[in-house]
Structures are given as structure tokens and as C-alpha cells.
Amino acid sequence: MTTRRLFLGLVTSAMLAAGCATAPSPSLQAGPPSTEFPPIVFVHGNGDSASIWQTTIWRFESNGWPRSRLHAIDLPYPLARDDDTKAQPGRTSTAQHMAYLKSEVEKVLTGTGARQIVLVGNSRGGYAIRNYIQNGGGDKTVSHAVLGGTPNHGVQAVKGQNEGNEFAGTGPFLTALNAPKNSRGDEVTSPVRWLTIRSDSNDKFAQPDGLWIGRPGQPTNLTYAAPELKGATNVVIARVDHRETSFSPAAFAATYQFITGHAPATASVLPEKRIVLGGKVSGLGVSSTDPASGNFVNNLPLPGAQLQVFATETLTGVRRGGAVYSKTIGPDGLWGPLVAQPETHYEFVIDAPGYATTHIYRSSFPRSSSIVNLRAERIAEADRNAPAIVTMTRPRGYLDPARDKMTFDGQTPPPGALPGAGVASSKIKPEGPPRSVTAEFNGERATGRSWPASQNHLSVLELTY
């Protein structure tokens, strides 16, 4: 396949929040229009979970894709090792990552009876996809592969610099993946059809300067085009950040057209009448060999945790009454089903030994989802004396004051938000008695309550889009 580029302009930030995007041109087609719905397996990135694909799955469903043929994997230990060759508690090697993906693909093939599937990955998830297709037999089981923001040539490519890490462009892992596959020098494995999606210049991990990888002022030996692959269809979307290369409406539109051969009917999330929610409750790990190193993310179940869900007032975050759902989490970590009310905001409260009582506030859910995954948090040592702790977070993108309209508890921009789309959360420590706190991003609004940190409580305002 020849390499083609398509520059997509995101109309405005407000349209992004509303689910609008510029549709790709017909030149993006990878083949004739499909008449069936192949199973799609979504692969999250470093430190993420299956839940990050929620809005993408909703957009596929809004275009008629059967829910039963959309599968998001949940890697138990989603963080990469510092050195891929050395075991590290709570982290996965490239080989382990690929083996897990291969196992999940085989489950989907068996469950659906399909001969082939589509793989869609964000960031590090693209590494597992490439490794599986090149070295794990995926060239036979995968028809299309879509890589959003994957650092295909590393986050830096400086000879001799941390080359044991899988993100090193000059290291053995990426050198092997990028080795020419044919006389044209293609970096992708045939006969799979490949699409890469990147930002024009706003991806924190595709920068000429090492600012976002802790080496400001030092060259990475990369360009903004580092996520592209020779032999793939390479799409460039203006102004999107690292995560929006997969989770923005424009990225969905490009992905949909590449898989099907035609543009989606809509890039919006269409509401459905009956909304049923569920997911998994997870926690945080602590290194047994170096407890002082702090918590690390995992996607393991948190059995014994107590979950309560409350409907809240949209403008204040105050509970409308008693819990509408409660459960003691079992060994599988799963919760649900909860039949949610349209246009209703919810507070999810997790109580678990060794954790703070975690209050997660979410705006209303337009559609059902089985990947409303929830994570219990701990109060950081630096925040122990805070009167209250409230975090605004945007899992599917970053907070860029130069691009987006946002405010947090009346502060514009939110504390810590930096131009250049490199920060995904903001934290404040409100004084005084418990009160309402609001986070807004490009028209989406989530309101919660502050809780006393002295009583081991913290709040998270999670924005969906």
C-alpha cells in the first residue's frame, strides 16, 4: 500500500466537544465498502484501561456497529518496563504485552466465529499490535490495523540513550519492528492494511525537543511525523493531542472510513433510550521491593471494595437521595448492571482498605457501557495536610489553554494546565467546609463536592469527551 496523507482540520474546540468532525476524503479508502461488521479489538496505551475506548465504541454503535462485535482489552499491568529485558514488579514486557493481546484476539475469534478481526490501538497499544502482527501470527488473523499516536519511531532516537526501553527509537524492539519488509522499504507487515493517525505538531511524544520526556532543550532526533510508517496510510489531524489521535471525533471518522471504505453517518454519540452501566473496580499497586517509589497503576480487580452510586444535582453535585446502586466487589472486580437515567449525573463512591474514600463525579451517560471502570485512589504524601483534594481529569485528551476553553472551580486556565497539550489533569485543595466544585471543558460540565481530606476522602471530576 502506498503511503498517503490527509490533513484534517478540527473545526473548533466546541465542535470537538459536541462530537463533530471534518469527514475524511474518499482518498482514505483502503478497499471496497464492507457489507459486514468485522469484530474490532481496541488496545489501550501505557497506564490506561479498557474504559478509555468508551466514546469510540459509542460512536461505532451510533453508526450501527453491533455492540457484541466491539471489544476493549484490559491489560492487567498496563505500564511498560523501564528496561524491556529486566523484570519489574507491576509492569509488562513487550513479549508479555503481545502474548496478552494474542490471547484476547483468539477469544474474540472463537466467540464471534469470525475469520479475521480489526485491531485499533492508541500509543503503546500500537506496539503490541505491530508485534503481534509481525511476530505472533496476526498477519493471518488481522485485516486492518489502526495506530493512533503510536510512537512508531520512539519518543526519542538518540543512540546509546536508554535503549533497553521499548520507547527508544534506536533500541532493539523498535529497530526490529521498523526493519524494511520488502524492496520498497515498507515498515509494515503485509497483507494487513495499516493506518496511522498523528497530530500535525501537538503530540507530546512526537516532538523535536525532549521537553515532555524530561529532557528540555535536548534534541530527540525525531520530527512531528515520527508516528508515521512507510507502507501505511498516514493521516494527519490538525491540533489534536497525543490521546485525541485515537479518541477525538476526527480520529473516529478516519478510522471508520479506513475500515469500511466510506465515511460514517455521524461522528456524534447518539443517545439510546435504555442505558445500562457496568465495569470494573481497580486499585493501585505498591512495589514490594521499593515502597518509597510510590503507587503504580494496574487493572487488577479490587475485591472487597464497597461501591455506591448516587444520582446528583447537575448544578451542585448534591446527592438526590440514597444510593441507586451498591455492591461489595467480588474477585472478578466487576460491578453492575445499573440502569441509569438519561441526562442524570452520577457520583461513584469507592471505599476500600488502604485507600481514600474516592468520590468520582461523572456527567450523564448517553449510552450503555460495560467499561465504566473505576479506580480507588490514595492521598499523596504531599497532600496529607490539605483541607480537601479535588482533581479535574480528562482521560481521552489533554488540557491545552492555547486551544481549548476550560475552567476549574472558577480558575481559567485550571492550575497546572500548560499550552502544548501535555497535561491531562488539574488538582486543587479547596479550603473551608464541603462545597460544590465545577470543571468545564469545551462545553462539557461536571460538578462534584469537596470532602474533608482529614477524614481520608478525595474527589475526582471526570470529563467524558
Image: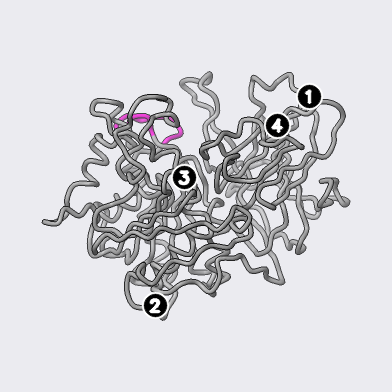
- Pair 1/4: label in front: 1
Of pointers 2 and 4, the one earlier in the residue sequence: 2
**Which residue is found at the position 67% from the left and 39% from the top?**
392
Name the one closer to the observer, 11 or 47.
Answer: 11
Question: Which segment did they paint magenta?
Answer: 81-91
Q: Secondary structure at mark 2?
A: loop
Question: Which residue is the site of mark 1?
Answer: 387
Question: Which residue is the site of mark 2?
Answer: 34
Q: Label 1 sits on what residue type?
A: Pro
Q: Secondary structure at mark 1?
A: loop
The span from disc 4 to disc 3 (Cα, nearest Å) is 30 Å
Question: Which residue is the site of mark 4?
Answer: 356
Residue 272 x, y percent position in the rendering: 68, 70
The N terminus appears in which quarter of the rendering?
bottom left
Specify how the rendered protein is coloured. one colour
Of pointers 3 and 1, the one earlier in the residue sequence: 3
Of pointers 2 and 1, the one earlier in the residue sequence: 2
Of pointers 1 and 4, the one earlier in the residue sequence: 4
Residue 374 x, y percent position in the rendering: 63, 46
In the image, farthest residue toward the left: 183
Residue 326 x, y percent position in the rendering: 76, 50
Q: Quadrant of residue 389?
A: top right
Q: Label 2 sits on what residue type?
A: Ser
